[in-house]
Amino acid sequence: MIVERPADLRRKKILAHGFMIIFLILILFPFLSVISISFRMGNFATGDLIPRNPTLEHWVLAFGFDYTRADGTVVEPPYPVLLWMWNSIKIGVIAGLGVLAIATISAYAFSRIRIRGKGTLLDSLFLIQMFPTTLALVAIYAIFDAMGEISPLLGLDSHVALILIYMAGVTLHIWTIKGYFDGIDTALDKAAAIDGATPWQTFRFIFLPLAVPMMAVVFVLAFIGFINDYPIASVLIRSEDKMTLAVGSRLYLNEFRYLWGDFAAAAILSGLPITVVFLIAQRYLVRGLSDGAVKG
Amino acid sequence: MSSTVTTTTGASSLPRLAFVGLTTLVLLYAAFYLYAQSQPLFGAVMLAIACGFAVIYGANRFYGARFIFPGIAAVLTFIALPIGYTIYLGFTNYSSFNLLSFDRATEVLLSRGAADPATEQPFAVAPEGDQFRIWLPESGLLSDPVMLTGEALAPVTAALSPAGAPASLLETRDAIRLREGLGLLTLTTPDGMQIVNSGLRTFASVTPEYAQQADGTLIRASDGTVLTPDHSTGFYVAPDGSQVPPGWRVGIGFGNFEKVFTSKGIRQPLFSIFVWTVVFAAASVGLTFALGLTLAVILQWEHLRFKTLYRILLILPYAVPAFISILVFKGLFNQNFGEINMILEGVFGIRPNWFTDGNLARVMILIVNTWLGYPYMMLLAMGFLQGVPEDHKKAAALEGASSARVFFTITLPQIMPPFLPLLIASFAFNFNNLVLILLLTTGGPDIPGTIIPAGRTDILASFTYRMAFDDSGTQFGLAGAITLMIFIVVAAMSYLNLVQMRRAAARRAGK
């Protein structure tokens, strides 16, 4: 391992690169075929990886414009992809900011302020967090069904209801930020206390500025989690113009109306921005993931 | 852990107290309003929030709790309450047949009316602009103008008043064309009688189908049948034992659980689904962990070039939103025109039935889930591998250990302890991986001969989801009962995880 013969090393290198390349071809195959499908004619056509008669039809439809085919027929966009995307982003950003505010303040208190029964509280939060919201779907449906009779704003088919449910998923994020706060030297808050700062002032002027990078990580994590949610949104949202991307996209691959090509273009259009955000943030994300999960 | 709580007293706390008082009043009003709207449960929750808010933000004693109140309140209201409510629903007969409250169900029955044939009288329709008036020649009554055509037809009520015959009346043939609109029309006579369309040429007055008696029973007007409310089944029951829908929601004790354990049509699929859920979660964790760790080890190799490029490409499956990838796979695996079967047929001459063969569907689920999950494990493994001291490995290598031996005796034992809680969390996540199952197979192919829809690839969570929200039947109560069983498994896992985390924390503290 320390001293290796050049021939052995060479063989190992070829082996490693060969394995990587074959593996990557397998892994990236779905992406390549989706790109190819989005430029192919029709919604059923099977063909080569590089389309023979490339068409922009699916892309024009995905952007919400009518498409006029060569023979003069006009095709209307099957679904409002951009509206769904806007719904997803709107819900994700609002709920993400809400989660961020609640989680940061709570994490600071759990890390620094003496509260009676804190240990028990933290343990019960951890236990509750293990129960995914998706398991309580029946109750969530029943609750918002009943609330809808009082105000449609809080009922089924309302974005407010969805945001409220999402915002309750703060526990994991409290954990992550608390882990970060625990790592900050206590000398800082002692110095602030000596200068007469209240705990709120210590939080506002010392901890909050320090936590900005971590908060960015938590926001991106929460945002991506909300964008990816299917079960809750599918139960609460019914009408097509209120749907989020995750709920709406499923309509494309309906057995009776199979729009494979249109789906491919819509999927790339909506998936690309989220993918880029994730790739930029991933370095910090991983640290957040392992820190938050391990630090008790 | 060392902050002194400074209590601000005097003038500065006055505006705060005023604000707290005002907000509490608003919350209390909301609680009262919810209670008045016959939602006692939500009223109680709101009352609890109001009291908690007043105490924690009003009194100086609870300074520290002010920081965590919003988070705790959100978690209690939107996670703990629904969990408790789900468990409660598991003990009720809540379903599409027993959807309403008792009061609402009675109201629905009492509002049912039947046209009385004895009061039938002919009618004619008088056009007025794009609207119409109904003319009843026998009683000399003419209605207010109403819409009877158009796309958005809805039930309407119009008043009748004495008048002379209108100048122009529609031919019967043209009036019949309006029957869709006429069917939704209710007319009110000057003395308060309700009259509806009862035939092609006639209107008749409506008499209620049921009348309520003093003892709470309902009597059917047409044949004198007495319906007794049965609060153990949640239905009005006729003397011959037949149930009259709609029913209402009642507690049925362990009824749902009895059904699960005694009915063969539920017990057998439930058992096979439970086994598959455990296998699926364990296999997913095992496959993603093994693959992720292997890739991480290769990427850590000092002689490997293009590491960054490989790394970025390898985490792509994790970066793309999962619901998009899953739907892409659904299309690629499509049996008839999916790309995967096209390639398999071209190379090996086979066309596997990925969606109709149960075992192949399970294999497909595992392939897709491994594809989705290995980058997460790889990223974690790369982080943990960096923590393994290089000189341990060098020492072992100097002693003549092969690189495989070094890996299994030095590296793996060092990264397993921090990895374990994450593996348990991953198991718990996959145990309830609803998104994957719902979007890829929706549980299918179905197991034949079951009472409720159950599929070969259904996991417990998707099984209950379909039971509650599928078109075929909304059995909320039964779904709640099965969810309670999932809760018990999840609770065991979360406790295990808590213990593991404590151990990891203690070990770190001991270092």
Image (tube, coloured by chain):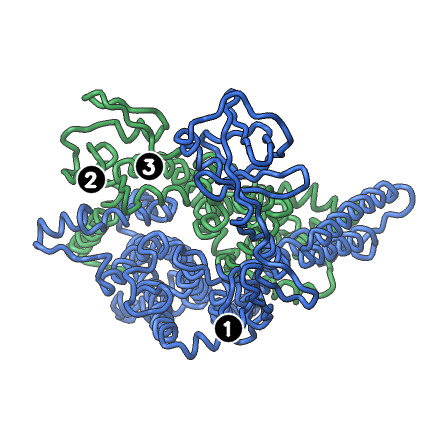
Q: Which one is closest to the eye, mark 3 or mark 2?
A: 2
Q: Image quadrant for the N terminus of chain B?
A: bottom right
Secondary structure at badge 1 equals loop
Q: Which residue is mark 1?
A: B241
Residue A256 lies in what quarter of the image?
A: top left
Q: Report the disc number at residue A44.
A: 2
Please state the chain letter of the residue tagged with numbered disc 1 in the rendered image: B
Q: Are marks 1 and 3 on the same chain?
A: no
> Looking at the image, how many numbered discs can be counted on the residues?
3
Q: Which one is closest to the eye, mark 1 or mark 3?
A: 1
Residue B306 location, x and y as percent?
27, 44
Q: Which one is closest to the eye, mark 1 or mark 2?
A: 1
Whether residue A177 appears in this view of the structure is no
Q: Report the disc number at residue A268.
A: 3
Of labels 3 and 2, earlier in sequence is: 2
Spatial CA distance of label 1 from label 3 is 59 Å
Look at chain B in the picture and name its colour: blue
Secondary structure at badge 3 equals helix
Q: Are marks 1 and 2 on the same chain?
A: no
The crowd level at tag 3 (other Cα within 10 Å; few <14, some 14-19, many 20+) is some
Spatial CA distance of label 1 from label 2 is 55 Å
Q: Any idea which chain is the green one in this picture?
A: A
Secondary structure at badge 2 equals loop
Residue B410 location, x and y as percent?
36, 69
Q: Report the disc number at residue B60.
A: none
